[in-house]
Amino acid sequence: MELRFIPVEEFYFALTLAVRTLEDIGDAALVEQMRSRLQERFGQASTVAAGRQNTFNYVFRVEGVDNSPASQLVISIADWQGKIRLSSDYGWSLDPQRKTIRTEKFSDRPRFCQQLKHYLAQWLDVPQITTL
C-alpha cells in the first residue's frame, strides 16, 4: 500500500461519489496529532472545511491495492465531531447512472480498514490509531 496526496487543486477531479465511512476513531488528542502530522507533511488539506464538526480532510489515491472493478482507490482522513474519520471507496463503485453499488470487495472493507490503520500508524508515526 502506498498513498499519494491529492492537493486541493486536484480534489474535484479525484472526487468519487462512492467514498463511504470506514471507521470513526479516537479522541481530541488523536485528532490534533493527525492534523499536525498531515499538515507538516502535506500542508493545506485537500478540501477547505470550515466548521466545528469538520476542519480538515486530506484525500489520497491508494496504490498497490486492488479495488476492481473501479480503476482507482481513494481514501480520506478527516476530523469529524472530535474523532478521526477514515473513509474510502474500497468495495464500492458507480453504475452507469452514477449510483453507488457494492462490489465483490465490499465484505473486505473491515480488513482493508485494519490494513489502512496499520499503514497510517507507521507512515505518520501515530501508533495509537490501531489501538483505539
Image (cartoon, grey):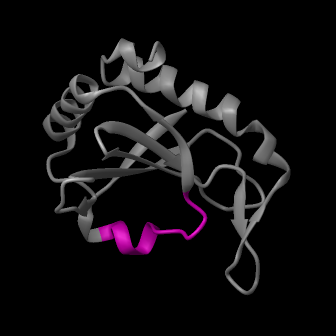
In the rendered image of this protein, does residue 116 appear above or below residue 132? below
Question: What is the quadrant of the N terminus in the image?
Answer: top right
Residue lying at 79% horizontally and 46% vertically, measured from the top left: 105
Residue lying at 69% horizontally and 29% vertically, measured from the top left: 111
Quarter assignment of residue 27? top left
**Residue 60 locus on image (x, y percent):** 41, 49
Q: Is residue 76 left or right of residue 96?
A: left
In the image, the segment drawn in magenta is 10-19
Q: Is residue 1 left or right of residue 60?
A: right
**Residue 14 locus on image (x, y percent):** 45, 67
Quarter assignment of residue 110? top right
**Residue 120 locus on image (x, y percent):** 41, 26
Question: What is the quadrant of the C terminus in the image?
Answer: top left
**Residue 57 locus on image (x, y percent):** 30, 52
Q: Is residue 6 left or right of residue 93?
A: left
Residue lying at 31% horizontally and 50% vertically, measured from the top left: 58
In the rendered image of this protein, does residue 48 appear above or below residue 21? below
Magenta-span inclusion, residue 128: no
